[in-house]
Image (spheres, rainbow, N blue to C red):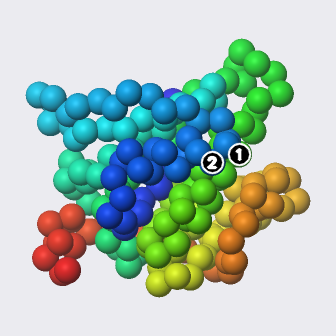
Amino acid sequence: MALEHHFYMDTAATPQEVRDVLVGAGIGFEARPDMAGGEEGLPDLSLATSPATNVTIYNDLSSIGVLPDNGVLATLYMGFRDRKLYLDKPGTEDDFEVQSTRGVMALLRAFPDADAYWVAYDAERPVLLRHGGRLVLAEAQSKDGRHWDAERQPYLALVDLPYTMGPLGPWPDVPIKSRAAAE
């Protein structure tokens, strides 16, 4: 089973502009050729990769069908997927988590007015929410060895933006068509 993180933003930026931010952040990502949607009905994709992480970026969320009702009307999706580098290269066990966290922080800095949220570990757990300029890290992820647990993992130290800790989710899913009508 693959380990994935899903990051959503409300931004007018193109997938290529978002990819360029990740590549330019100096965290190990390289740009890959864009992919066209084609007959499968997939949207155009922008891609980046590192030895530990694949990133897929697209701005056609219609195929998703539902998104969480958390106040963010996402227009862009980034999927971070663990390439399991650690299976072949000892000492790289944290590379995927570090690159995902640093990538999300780079995007939040690059698009300071964009509302955003991150659901991790195969979209099961809210990790952060930025809405109305306020960044909230999930309190539930700050204990018991989870993502923001400062006692066990260095990921909290990678957050270089003002934030608060607070309860996040679970968020009920809302059909994308219903959300678009609410705009």
> Badge 1, how many Cα within 10 Å: few under 14, some, many 20+?
some
> Badge 2, how many Cα within 10 Å: few under 14, some, many 20+?
some
- Give the residue type that dot 1 points to: Val
Task: Using the image, determine if residue 165 lies above or below residue 55.
Answer: below
Quarter placement of the C terminus: bottom left
Q: Residue at x 20, y 33 (%)?
A: 37
Res. 118 mark: none
Q: Give the mark nearer the N terminus: 2 vs 1.
A: 2
Residue designated by label 2: 25
Percent across and percent down for residue 96 are: 65, 38
Q: Which quadrant of the figure has residue 159?
A: bottom right
Percent across and percent down for residue 162 are: 69, 77
Q: CA distance from mark 2 to mark 1?
A: 13 Å
Task: Using the image, determine if residue 70 lies above or below residue 41.
Answer: below
The answer to whether the residues at label 2 and label 1 have Cβ atoms under 8 Å apart is no
The residue closer to the viewer here, 138 or 16, is: 16
In the displayed structure, does residue 89 sit left or right of residue 41?
A: right
Label 2 residue SS: loop
Is there any visible trace of residue 167 in the rendered image? no
Q: Which residue ends up furthest to the right in the rendered image?
A: 151
In the displayed structure, does residue 87 sit left or right of residue 20?
A: right
Res. 98 mark: 1
Label 1 residue SS: helix
- Give the residue type that dot 2 points to: Ala
Q: Residue at x 21, y 48 (%)?
A: 63
In the displayed structure, does residue 38 sit left or right of residue 46?
A: left
Q: Residue at x 70, y 19 (%)?
A: 87
Is there any visible trace of residue 93 in the rendered image? yes
Q: Which quadrant of the figure has residue 141?
A: bottom right
